[in-house]
């Protein structure tokens, strides 16, 4: 099985992968800034504010998925959790 075939059989959509990569990239950026002493005089406050902004951004993006899928007809966004084999069983039962 080639790499491209393995990627196609993953239970995650490209949107899910990109959101996780964005979140992990931001976490790595904060860690780099912490080690490089670029967070200012109060590093805990700077980390708290940056992670808070990241949390609000991810929340707004995740809440925008359902209206976008309804308006544009992207059923893969709203049905990704239902068809994923890696989704926990309690989630599948509570959303159906």
Image (tube, grey):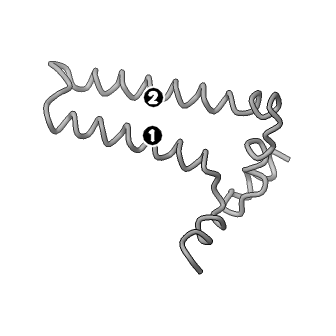
Per the image, the residue denoted by label 1 is 23
How far from the left and from the top, in percent, is residue 1?
59, 81
In this rendering, would 59 be left or right of 69? left
Give residue 40's quadrant in the image: top left
Q: Which mark is residue 93?
A: none
Vertical comparison of 87 with 73: above or below = below
Q: Using the rendered view, name the quadrant where residue 84 is placed.
A: bottom right
- Image quarter of residue 68: top right
> Foreground residue, 8 or 49?
8
**Mark sitting on residue 54:** 2
* Residue toward you, 65 or 34: 65
First in sequence: mark 2 vs mark 1: 1
Relative height, residue 21 to residue 73 (above, below): below
Q: Is residue 35 above or below residue 54?
A: below
- Contact, mark 2 vs mark 1 (Cβ under 8 Å): yes
Q: Residues within 10 Å of mark 1 (few under 14, many from 20)?
A: some
């Amino acid at each position: 099985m080639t790499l491209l075939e393995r990627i196609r059989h993953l239970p995650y959509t490209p949107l899910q992968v990109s959101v996780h990569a964005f979140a992990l990239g931001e976490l790595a950026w904060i860690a780099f800034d912490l080690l490089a002493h670029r967070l200012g005089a109060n590093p805990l406050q700077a980390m708290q504010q940056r992670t808070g902004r990241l949390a609000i951004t991810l929340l707004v993006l995740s809440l925008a998925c359902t209206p976008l899928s309804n308006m544009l007809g992207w059923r893969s966004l709203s049905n990704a959790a239902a068809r994923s084999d890696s989704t926990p069983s309690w989630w599948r039962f509570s959303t159906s």
